[in-house]
Amino acid sequence: MSKNPQASGNVVAIGTDIVECSRIASMIEKHGDLFLSRVYTEREVEYARARASMIQHFAGRWAAKEAVLKVFGTGWSQGIQWSEIEVQNDEHGRPMIELSGRAFEVCQQLGIHEVLISISHCATYAIAFATGVRST
C-alpha cells in the first residue's frame, strides 16, 4: 500500500462508520485485554492508551476498521481479521491504513492501491470515513 498522503487515482469505493464511545468503553470494561488483543494491534493499543481520551481513540480506530470493510464490501467475511486492518499515524499525526493478511489480499483483488481514512471523535461518538483509490 502506498503511504503517499496525497494519493491520486480513481475512487473505487467509500465507507463510513459511527460508533458510540460508551459501547467501546463497555467492551473494554467487560472483556479487558481479550477484547483489545482481538480488535487492535499492539501499536494501536499503545497509541490509544497514551492518550488522555483513550476510549475515544479506541472508538475511532474501531470505526475506521468498519469503514474500511465497507470499502471492501465484504464485512467480516472472507477470513479478514480485525488486526489485519491497522490504523497508524504518519509523522504529522495524519491517520493512515496499513493492511496485512487477507485484508491486503482482498484490497489487491479489488484493484485498490490505497485506502485513505479520516477519523473524528468527541466524548459521545467516533466516526470514520474511508476511501479506496485505484492508482492512475
Image (cartoon, helix red, strand yellow):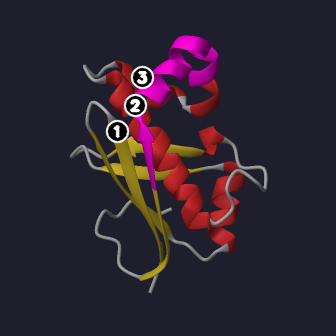
Which residue does the image show at 21% across and 46% down from the upper left? 92
Q: Quadrant of the C terminus?
A: bottom left
Check residue 24 for magenta coloring: yes
Amino acid carrying mark 3 in the image: Glu
Q: Are marks 2 and 3 in contact (CB under 8 Å)?
A: no
- Give the residue at x 51% y 71%: 113
Disc 1 residue crowd, few under 14, some 14–19, many 20+, Cα 10 Å: some
Instruction: Indicate the position of residue 36 as horizontal and vertical percent values.
Output: 56, 23
Q: Quadrant of residue 6?
A: bottom left
Q: Amino acid at mark 2?
A: Cys
Q: Position of residue 53 (x, y in %)?
A: 28, 24
The residue under label 1 is 125
Tell me the distance, in whole angstroms, between the alpha carbons under discs 1 and 2. 5 Å
Q: Quadrant of residue 8?
A: bottom left
- The label nearer to you, 1 versus 3, is 1
Please tell me which residue lies in front, 55 or 4: 55
Region in magenta: 17-36
Looking at marks 1 and 3 on the same chain, the residue that comes earlier in the sequence is marked by 3
Q: Give the amino acid at mark 1.
A: Tyr
Q: Tell me, yes or no, whether the two marked residues, 1 and 2, touch with CB atoms within 8 Å.
A: yes
User: Disc 1 versus disc 3: distance between alpha carbons?
Assistant: 21 Å
In this image, 101 relative to 83: left or right? Answer: right
Q: What residue does disc 2 label?
A: 21
Above or below, 128 relative to 59: below
Question: Element type at marker 3?
Answer: helix
Above or below — where is 67 with respect to 126?
below
Q: Which label's residue is closer to the chain start, 2 or 3?
A: 2
- Separation of marks 2 and 3 at Cα, in angstroms: 18 Å
Of residue 27 and residue 44, the one placed in the foreground of this image is: 27
Numbered circle sitting on residue 46 = 3
Residue 20 sits inside the magenta stretch: yes
Q: Where residue 72 sits: x, y (%)?
A: 61, 65
